Image: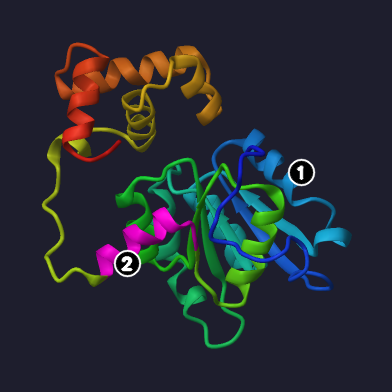
Amino acid sequence: MTERGGEPGTPGTPGTETAGRRARVVLVDDHRMFRAGVRAEIGVTAETGVEVVGEAGDVDEAVSVIRETRPDVVLLDVHLPGGGGVEVLRRCAQLTAAATDPVRFLALSVSDAAEDVIGVIRGGARGYVTKTITGQDLVDAIFRVSDGDAVFSPRLAGFVLDAFASSEPAAAVDEDLDRLTQREREVLRLIARGYAYKEVGKELFISVKTVESHVSAVLRKLQLSNRHELTRWATARRLV
């Protein structure tokens, strides 16, 4: 997370809406360093009212921790080992549908791709913010989701409105895209947007060598020769 402008979907003076309130949160992300960063951004419980009661790095661990702690809000990454955020939502569906004290999910991801946003919202998440959000805006978003509100930036909200307003059937499965792992898709999108390998690594908390391995795998699976062809391929599918 960075100190860039934050998510415009959280209006109001920072901190004024959360004073004196409490929210129990579980962090679900496969990067330990990122989870530590979220803890730091959320701040001291006595000051922000947000208490981190559990963490998880994959789907199975997430489901176990969520069922055990029954938090108010789960900060959920979209791409996780074991099936992704949608699988966590599917397996926790009874908790999100609880008549009293439901567990609510707020997606927190590096991806701002339409299919990722729509997928987790259809799965039951109450909102979706990207990892550029500031700490105070994230705290505000947690409390809003805890209250049952939906939280999005205007761009991401547009994806959801378009998807649910459309009467058209869902798009056909893209067999080429399905050959890629979730991590390979993340690397693909960033490379197609013009990120250097070092920038991709910093954004995804992985090494440059790992980025290079993912790019090689993507090119091989899609039968492409270079990043220019990869960019054209991704653009044609509106993945950029």
**Residue 129, position in %: x, y?**
51, 53
Is 130 drawn above or below residue 141 in the view shown?
above
Quarter of the image that includes the N terminus: top right
Is 235 drawn above or below residue 85 in the view shown?
above
Residue at 51 percent across and 74 percent down: it is 95
Residue at 79 percent across and 73 percent down: it is 21
| Residue extent of the magenta highlight | 152-164
Element assignment for label 1: helix
Visible residue check, residue 135: yes
Is 216 drawn above or below residue 221 in the view shown?
above
Label 1: which residue?
40
Q: Main secondary structure of the magenta part?
A: helix
Residue at 76 percent across and 69 percent down: it is 18
The dot on residue 161 is: 2
Q: Mark 1: few, some, or many residues within 10 Å (few <14, many ≥20)? A: few
Residue type marked 1: Ala
Of the two numbered discs 2 and 1 on the same chain, state the one appearing first in sequence: 1
Residue 154 is a magenta residue: yes
Q: Mark 2: few, some, or many residues within 10 Å (few <14, many ≥20)? A: few
Residue type marked 2: Leu
